[in-house]
Amino acid sequence: MIYHKPRSIKDTVFGVFCCLIINCLLVNCFLFNAAAKAEQKIEKLMTEKQQPIAFTLLDQMIAQKMALDIRYFCQQEDTPKHCWQGVTTLPDELAQLITDTNLGSVVLFAENFDTTEQVVKLTHDLQQAALKSSLKKPLIISVDQEGGRVFRFNKGTAFAGNMALGATYTQHQTYYTERVNHVIATELKALGISNNYAPVVDVNTNSQNPVINTRSYGEKPIEVAKHGVSAVKALQQHGIMATLKHFPGHGDTHVDSHLGLPRVDHPLNVIEKNDIFPFSWAIKQASPAMIMTAHIQYPALDDSTFTSKSGKTFIRPATMSRKILHDLLRTKMQFKGIIATDALDMAGIAHYFDKVQATVETFTAGADLAVMPFKVRKPSDVQAFKQFIKAVSKALETRIEQGEFTLAELEASVARINHHKESYITLPSVSLAKQIEQANNIIASSFHLELEQELADEATVLLKNEQGLIPLKQYSANINAKANADNHSNNNAALNIHVLVENQLEFEALTLAINEEFAIAKLAQPHITAVIATDKSSLMNKENNAALKRSDLFISTINVKTASLVDLGGMDDLVTVPTGKVASTSKESKLTYDKLVELALANAKAQQKPVVFIGRGSPYLMSPYSQHADVVLLGFDDRSFYHNNAAQSPGYNSAIGILLGNQQAQGKLPVSL
């Protein structure tokens, strides 16, 4: 429990109240009630006529310490509770909000990205709105561009993600980590983005981890640390603020902090050697601009408690812990950069604190930036957000009066943010048209896409190879020899390949990969038949059974990953989209296909067909499929996309190339199964 000094008695009512306080816990409850009343006032303002709100200097400092997401915005006040209009052009209301409040930062999501031209125009307009403010400070424009499963700009170069980079470590150390992050930084810079919420340096030691998993470089702290340093240096050399996350470590959890409050019970020596080691190493070696907190309980670091808005008592999460953020990270570890919270609308915080209380708690703990503390989704929310800033300002002023925080700390925090803005944010000196032209030449350039393919090639892991299937060109020669002996057929007769894929895009990408790799191997183009999965009946119909019976080889693919809200974006995805798309953290949407793949693999094996399984994603989830396959290839690049009117998949290209013997499997798993 955090104890507070009582306020001075200023009037009779307050004096009577103070006399009833028998311990400091009741003061904590009082502060919570005050924050709750402020929250109710904000909600009421959402429906009231908007009135001008004057900002004090303290209010302006608070606004500079906030990072607001602009994922959605609807002009209509009578819109349903959840607005689903993605912000691709800056609405006047949001522009005015930025100007009026001196907002410090914005966060972009996939809904803010359409074309390269559109993104450049959006970031340009955001900065122009910021420069019209009284302080004339540019915005920190942030995005989660980790690569792999967390990739917001679908027109850019995605790469295969951190675990793919970890899989290249044995052969190449951090060579690809550096090259990949050079490209990511170059593309972000071209788009007008100044801060990447990456790299993830959590050490993934829990195979059941739903939120980190393949976002981690691996399970060895020193390797994770070296990758992290390479990523930070590459990003920051190109003027992009790097963000180490999630401090003090999210690698050994089985709860997604989007949905709950995880807890890590490691003893202090394990925390120092494992969880925080990559952070301390990177602070010393690379001076990261930013570190993001984790909404996680770490009793060995701070076992103090708080009273939630439901009245229950819980151990304080790292995001709200002064012992962890100020005493450990800022003082002991000597971190000089910006401490940013993870999103404050995540359940790991929002289920326990109201908006005002959460923001104040994290500021007094030592955070510089409160990320996504308030949703602005329609015009009336603009006025409510301004009142929210004032409520936070008033509550923080009270904490300063009580001696739990100091004005000097607040001023130092704002100065730290502005120092990093001056160091990293250089607004373009050329015209908007020229910026767009330059960006079009950079985003997803042929050089960048070649590197994406190269990483996929180097990272793919061969987990199983039985029946002599690899190299497939040798197997094909054996099939042809048998056919020639039996039927006097052409020595280069085409193979019959039957495939199971999830959708049309996957089928086109896999087909292109097969045809191109067969051409490289100088083999006749195979006859490809397919089941494009819809349900179980599509697998069991007569046409499919006949195609499988005629086939010389069966191939099935699946993207295997533990679902998390981070893949989609955030807490907004918990609810149903009006178009009928349901965003869920469960695997319900994939369940039918998961079982279909298992059934298909077992069926093909039962018919004594050579079986190849191509898994893309988490190595921890391969077992149900591997047991039925002769060849198991794991690639971390699970992206299929259209480029130059053709379906592409770096992961499929690598897997089929290895299968045919056109290249060797170089990847080594950076985690234990």
Image (cartoon, rainbow, N blue to C red):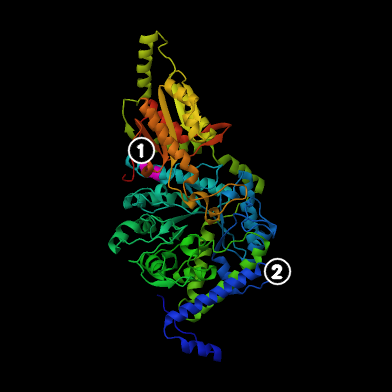
Please state, as top left, top right, bottom left or bottom right, where the C terminus lies in the image: top left
> Residue 547 versus residue 22: which sits nearer the camera?
547
Dot 1 amino acid type: Gly
Residue 473 point in image, percent of width and height: 38, 21
Q: Is residue 171 above or below residue 469?
A: below
> Residue 656 versus residue 190: which sits nearer the camera?
656
Q: In this view, does 446 lie to the left or right of 562?
A: right
Please state, as top left, top right, bottom left or bottom right, where the N terminus lies in the image: bottom left
Type of secondary structure dominating the magenta stretch: helix
The structure residue drawn at horizontal position 47% and vertical position 35%, both measured from the top left corner, is 650
Q: Is residue 83 above or below residue 319?
A: above
Examine the image and state in which quarter residue 76 appears.
bottom right
Evaluate whether residue 654 shows in this view.
no
Evaluate whether residue 221 shows in this view.
yes
Q: Is residue 11 left or right of residue 382?
A: left
Residue 288 point in image, percent of width and height: 43, 57
Dot 2 amino acid type: Gln
Mark 2 burial class by Cα count in 10 Å: few <14, some 14-19, many 20+: some
Callout 2: SS = loop
Looking at the rendering, the stretch of residues picked out in magenta corresponds to 163-168
Q: Nearer the viewer, mark 1 or mark 2?
A: 2
Callout 1: SS = loop
Q: Is residue 50 left or right of residue 197?
A: right
**Residue pointed to by mark 2:** 50
**Residue pointed to by mark 1:** 667
